[in-house]
Image (spheres, rainbow, N blue to C red):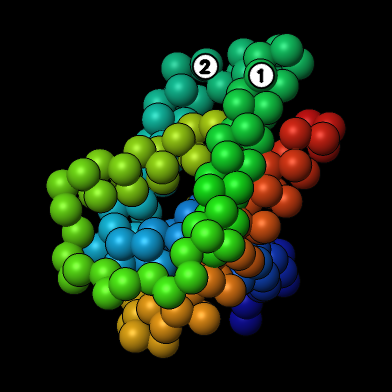
Amino acid sequence: MLDQQLVAFAIVAAVITIIPGADMALIARSVLTHGRRAAYVTSLGVCTGLWVHAVASALGLSAVLLTSATLFSAVKLGGAVYLVTLGALSIRRALLVAEPGPRPQGTTAGDARRAFAQGLLSNLLNPKVALFWLAVYAYFLGRLGAVLRRPGVRRALEGVTGALLIGIGGRLAWERR
């Protein structure tokens, strides 16, 4: 027989996994702009950010973040500004690009570095970090690549992910701990 607390935890974890957050929005953005490989690299950046958070926690640095309202707010506002900037850039692309040309297949080294840095920064600048199955999310979005690259769909998704990033950044900036 399963423990009721374990079942409740599994249900909550599943719901949190399905609800998109900043990391998932960035992965969706990476799929749209540079393909599945870039989304995997973004996910790797997010995971590296988690590793940094884990090491900071083990060293007791996370306790400083939790006890210092000023430091917590600074990290939170830095993350909010970063997300709003990424969101604004996505919306700008959605509005300014009339008909995007064919995107070359593959990910360049520069694309991979940017994707990794975006995932890392998104995670490091989020003091309330949580990660579930981002590589699986990137895989399924990548499988939908042909549909997602249609100009109308791409513009709509750029606009939606941009608005989502701005909304998450705004919520992050204004919420209390």
Q: Is residue 129 visible?
A: no
The residues tagged by marks 1 and 2 sit, at their Cα atoms, a distance apart of 18 Å
* Viewer-side residue, 66 vs 162: 162
Would you identify the image quadrant in which residue 105 lies?
Answer: bottom left
Relative vertical location of residue 47 with respect to residue 134 in this rendering, above or below: above
Q: Amino acid at mark 1?
A: Ala
Can you give x and y, in whole percent of width and height, for residue 39 in the image? Answer: 34, 60
- Badge number at residue 15: none
Crowding around mark 2 (Cα neighbors within 10 Å: few <14, some 14 to 19, many 20+) is: few
Mark 1 or 2: in front is 1
Q: Nearer the viewer, residue 41 or 158?
A: 158
In front of the other: 58 or 177: 177
Q: Does residue 124 appear in the picture of this structure?
A: yes
Looking at the image, residue 104 lies above or below residue 72: below
Residue 40 drawn above or below residue 116: below
Instruction: Tell me what residue is drawn at x 21 percent, y 44 percent.
Output: 110
Give SS at disc 1.
Answer: helix
Residue 158 x %, y %: 54, 65
The amino acid type of the residue labelled 2 equals: Gly
Q: Residue at x 37, y 54 (%)?
A: 43
Say which mark, if any, is on residue 60: 2
Look at mark 1 in the image and give the residue it sits on: 74
**Which residue corresponds to the image point at 34% horizontal and 76% vertical from the top-left?**
142
Within the image, what quadrant is residue 50 found in? top left
- Quarter of the picture containing the N terminus is bottom right
* Residue 58 placement (x, y as % from top left): 45, 24
